[in-house]
Amino acid sequence: MSDDDKTDDTEDNTIVEKGPSIGEYRRESIPEYIVDSNGVRFDFNRIALEGDGGLEPSQLDQNECLIAPGLIYRRSKTV
């Protein structure tokens, strides 16, 4: 695949920073926010709902991401 064929889905979205813990879910800390390797900040929004097949990505809006163990973060509107 050439660079012209790549979409936003192929970007490296590694978490490089986490905010302070605001709670716990499934024995894991819930960071107030996360920052990806592109410098984009996402704020914690909600716990993901589980269906029969596990976590359902279809519940995400375009500006949201899902991280283990089932936390949904929304892209921050702050710069």
Image: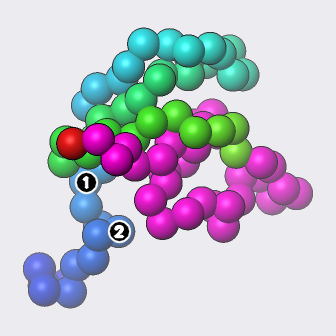
Name the residue: 72% across, 22% down: 26
At 29% from the left and 70% from the top, the residue drawn is 8
The answer to whether residue 25 is magenta is no
The residue drawn where x is 71% and y is 52% is 55
Mark number displayed over residue 12: 1
Give percent across and percent down for residue 33.
Answer: 41, 29
Q: Secondary structure at mark 2?
A: helix
Residue 16 appears in the picture as rendered: yes
- Of residue 39 and residue 76, the one placed in the foreground of this image is 76
Q: Please rate how many residues cluster around mark 1, counting C-alpha atoms within 10 Å: few if below 14, some from 14 to 19, many from 20.
A: few
Task: Kindly give the residue lying farthest to the right in the view shown.
Answer: 52
**Mark 2 closeness class: few <14, some 14–19, many ≥20 residues within 10 Å:** few
Q: Is residue 36 above or below residue 57?
A: above
Say which amino acid is labelled 2.
Answer: Asp
* Residue 64 inside the magenta-drawn segment: yes
Q: Nearer the viewer, residue 52 or 31?
A: 31
Q: In the image, residue 34 lies at what x, y percent? A: 37, 32
Extreme residue in the left direction: 3
How far separated are the C-alphas under marks 1 and 2? 9 Å
Residue flagged by tag 1: what amino acid is it?
Asp
Left or right placement of residue 43 versus residue 37 in this view: right
Quarter of the image for the C terminus: give it.
top left
Q: Mark number for residue 9?
A: 2
Q: How many marks?
A: 2
Report the magenta residues as a range. 49-78
Instruction: Let me know if residue 14 appears in the view.
Output: no
